[in-house]
Image (cartoon, grey):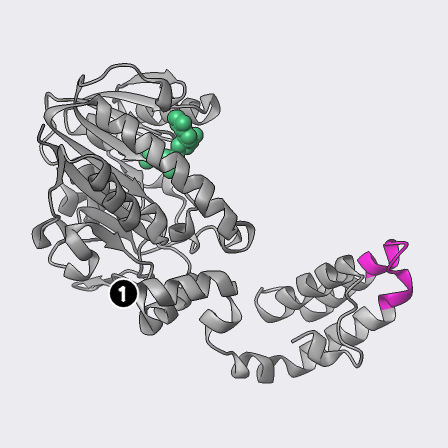
Amino acid sequence: MLAERMSQGLPEDQPRLLALLATGAAQILDLAVADHAAVDLSVRLAKADPDLGHLAGLVNAILRRLTRERNAILAAGGDPLDTNTPDWLAARWRAAYGEDAARRIAAAHLEGAAVDLTIRADTAAWAERVGGVALGLGSVRLTDVDAPVVSLPGYDEGAWWVQDAAAALPARLLGAVSGETIADLCAAPGGKTAQLAAAGATVVAVDRSGARLDRLRKNLQRLGLSAEVRVGDALALNEDGAFDAVLLDAPCSATGTIRRHPDVAWTKTEADLGRLADLQRRLLDKAAALVKPGGRLVYCTCSLEPEEGEAQADAFLSRHPGFERIPVTANEVAGQTEMVGRHGDLRTLPCHLPLLSSGETVARRGGLDGFFATRLRRIA
Ligand SMILES: C[S@@+](CC[C@H](N)C(=O)[O-])C[C@H]1O[C@@H](n2cnc3c(N)ncnc32)[C@H](O)[C@@H]1O
């Protein structure tokens, strides 16, 4: 779009010029910045840069042209799968989910994310108190996405915590956990640890990041919950068969969270996937060893990439004949069977759960984080 408006195209040897023009264009086309302020800022930045000073007039001309042509540019739009998605991700989502779903995923990324709460008890009553819609999935979606959550009723007393509705599903797949001892591997900042502790489990929360575990401790403290918190590499755990259940929320490409972290689409590369899939495989094998016979293992990632989800689960079952899948039922996803994938694994997409309402109350945003989860049982 910028290149089309420059007679000689974008100069390839001026990356800072491109960054400056792209920033100015985003302010003019997408953000609520006054035109004159956007143009003026970019021109001043160009003048202040010894390599770009002589191009300040060009910056001024191009950005002013954008302000004049804004309506035509926005009307021309284009499908976000073509205009707002790296080619390699668009190709993967087409292959994994089909053309239509890939387009809906890319469109959902432009909508932004809702704010969902996981409620400790009495979801319907809290939905009313905080001004939200009770999703059948067990979470409450706030109707006002801009509400400062710390000032909502129930924050100080720890009645709920912020957690995307999809992110809350994997821990629920463990079912009744009261009285069980559960290893939460890769636990920080602790949304799933809180769910398990609130449901009455004794939780061993392991993460290799001390800083993220500090957040987990603070979160649990506000909620009046406790867990045994361990800083360290989950791969080094040496307690084979000690746990009734293991939850492994493995590190991943996080392409399921692009609605809230748009940078993920542009900073991750295909090479990251191979490295992460290898770590996930090793963590899964460790998790399997920790589960006692008859116990359950839930593996999940906030990724849209099959290598980090479906393929990882299939490969695990080939390596571990002593485990079987326990398929997710329609009831567990409030009848939204589009969230149950091949073989009964959980597969949520950002385009699932479009706008919702309950009576008079309408949530301003639909959608979910993209999550994968498989539930396994150790049979031998
Ligand atoms: C997806 S996040 C976990 C989110 C968390 N389960 C929650 O619900 O709030 C992944 C976590 O894995 C941790 N991690 C990565 N590799 C690890 C390893 N080898 N052992 C333990 N933790 C690890 C990271 O520090 C990060 O906190």
Label 1 Cα neighbours within 10 Å, binned few <14 / some 14-19 / many ≥20: few
Occupied quadrant, residue 315:
top left
Q: Residue at x 30, y 58 (%)?
A: 349
Instruction: Give the SS element for disc 1.
Output: loop
Residue 266 x/y as whole percent: 55, 55
- Viewer-proximal residue among 354 and 13: 13
Residue drawn at point x = 38 percent, y = 52 percent: 256
Residue at the spot 69% in from the left edge and 74% down from the top edge: 2
Q: Is residue 49 magenta?
A: yes
Above or below, 15 relative to 172 = below
Q: Position of residue 319 (x, y in %)?
A: 23, 36
Is 333 on the left-hand or right-hand side of 50? left
> x, y (%) of residue 193?
27, 29
Q: In the rendered image of this protein, does residue 313 appear above or below residue 352?
A: above
Quarter of the image with the N terminus is bottom right
Magenta stretch bounds: 44-56
The relative height of residue 315 versus residue 4 in the rendered view (above or below) is above
Q: Quadrant of ligand 1?
A: top left
For the C terminus, give its image quadrant: top left
Residue indicated by mark 1 = 354
**Main secondary structure along the magenta-highlighted residues:** helix
For badge 1, the amino acid type reads: Pro
